[in-house]
Amino acid sequence: MKRSILAAVATAVALSLSAPAYANYDAARAQLIRSVERELPRYVQGVDLSQLSNAKLAEIKAALHGPGSRGDKQAKIKSILGGSYSLRGLLFN
């Protein structure tokens, strides 16, 4: 009996803790997108940030705030984005 009560309490605690964590994840992702969204147009136009992974968003943010000239940062960001923004994409697409 005690084990079933403990299991029920543990399940209830786990479920109550998982919902706020998911909400915090969405809020943190939205904040990261807004942060990159403000500065990215100075370097690259027409990027749909909602399609990028959190890792790529974080890399872009690091490139925006990292060392280097405007051209260096632009090249790093285009490399991170890949596709039509990369040199390979420009030459072969």
Image (cartoon, rainbow, N blue to C red):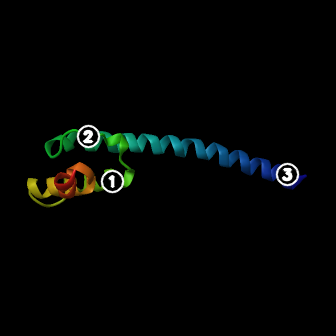
Q: Could you tell me how far apart the alpha carbons at marks 2 and 1 are, in whole angstroms?
A: 13 Å
Report the amino acid beneath label 1.
Lys
Q: Find disc 2 in the rendering and name its residue.
A: 37
Residue 83 left/right relative to 53: left
Residue under the point 83% across and 49% down: 5
Q: Are marks 3 and 1 in contact (CB under 8 Å)?
A: no
Q: Find disc 1 in the rendering and name its residue.
A: 56
Q: Nearer the viewer, residue 20 or 75?
A: 75
Residue 5 left/right relative to 49: right
Tally of numbered discs: 3
Residue 65 left/right relative to 49: left
Report the amino acid beneath label 3.
Ser
Query: Residue 31: which numbered mark, if any?
Result: none
Q: Find disc 3 in the rendering and name its residue.
A: 4
- Whichever of callouts 2 and 1 sits on the residue coming sooner in the sequence is 2
Residue under the point 26% across and 54% down: 82
Question: For the residue labelled by badge 1, is the local secondary structure a helix, a strand or a loop?
Answer: helix
Report the amino acid beneath label 2.
Glu
- Whichever of callouts 3 and 2 sits on the residue coming sooner in the sequence is 3
Question: For the residue labelled by badge 2, is the local secondary structure a helix, a strand or a loop?
Answer: helix
Question: For the residue labelled by badge 3, is the local secondary structure a helix, a strand or a loop?
Answer: helix
Q: Position of residue 78 (x, y in %)?
A: 20, 53
Q: Could you tell me how far apart the alpha carbons at marks 3 and 1 are, in whole angstroms?
A: 44 Å
Between disc 2 and disc 1, the foreground one is: 1
Q: Position of residue 51 (x, y in %)?
A: 36, 43
Residue under the point 71% across and 45% down: 12
Residue 56 left/right relative to 92: right
